Amino acid sequence: MYRHHTIEERLHVVIRIQLGEALESLCRKERLDKKMVRQWYLRYQKYGEEGLRGTRSYHYSKKEKIKIVEECMVKGLPLQEICLRYDLNRSTIQTWMRKIRQGISLANKQRGRPPKAPMPRPKKKEPQTELEKLQAENLRLRAENALLKKVKALVEEQEAIARPNGQKPSTN
């Protein structure tokens, strides 16, 4: 099972290696992966204590990914050297290599929710005949009348709530 190691733990292990403790015996005692500890040590040598914090969050383009994988697969450079050179995790490069072997694209996927398409405005149709113009105006006036009735009913309801006895006012 994978366990996240704090920066202090990583630094402690690296210092023990610098003091002369053998990498293999240290890994056996602490139950650590030898490749991972060697990577910590090399990153510490190259980047200092900041190298133990992890890799930078940079999104490589498809061409850059292919170039990095080719250095490992074609040129035969060790994976550790490539990890140090490009400040990447070993597992990231291994994932890219696996995708290339399986024929899967290395293109970056769009992350997050897709953007909403803007709602198009309704097209205004000009009524062609006088009858259609009158029907459109009649429809608009009916909607306006219904809205005004609702507003009046809401105002009366608010006034009734405000009165202590709840009766309607007289219309004298």
Image (tube, helix red, strand yellow):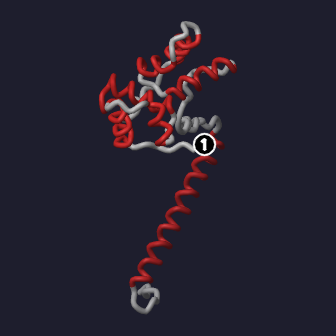
Nearest the viewer among 20 and 127 is 20
> How far across and how far down the image is residue 3, in percent?
50, 44
User: Which residue is denoted by mark 1 in the rendering?
Assistant: 133
Between 3 and 138, the one lying in front of the other is 3
Placement of the C terminus among the 4 image quadrants? bottom left
Q: Nearer the viewer, residue 107 or 168?
A: 107
Residue 56 x %, y %: 39, 29
Q: Position of residue 127 (x, y in %)?
A: 62, 37
Q: In the image shown, does 49 or 134 lie closer to the viewer?
A: 49
42 left or right of 117? left
| Residue type pointed to by label 1 | Lys
Query: Which residue occupies the extreme right position in the image?
Result: 102
In the displayed structure, 102 sits above or below 2; it is above
Q: Position of residue 13 (x, y in %)?
A: 38, 37
Numbered disc 1: secondary structure: helix
Disc 1 packing (10 Å; few <14; some 14–19; many ≥20) = few
Say whether residue 121 is visible.
Answer: no
Left or right: residue 167 compared with residue 124? left
Q: At 49% from the left edge and 64% from the top edge, which residue is drawn?
A: 148
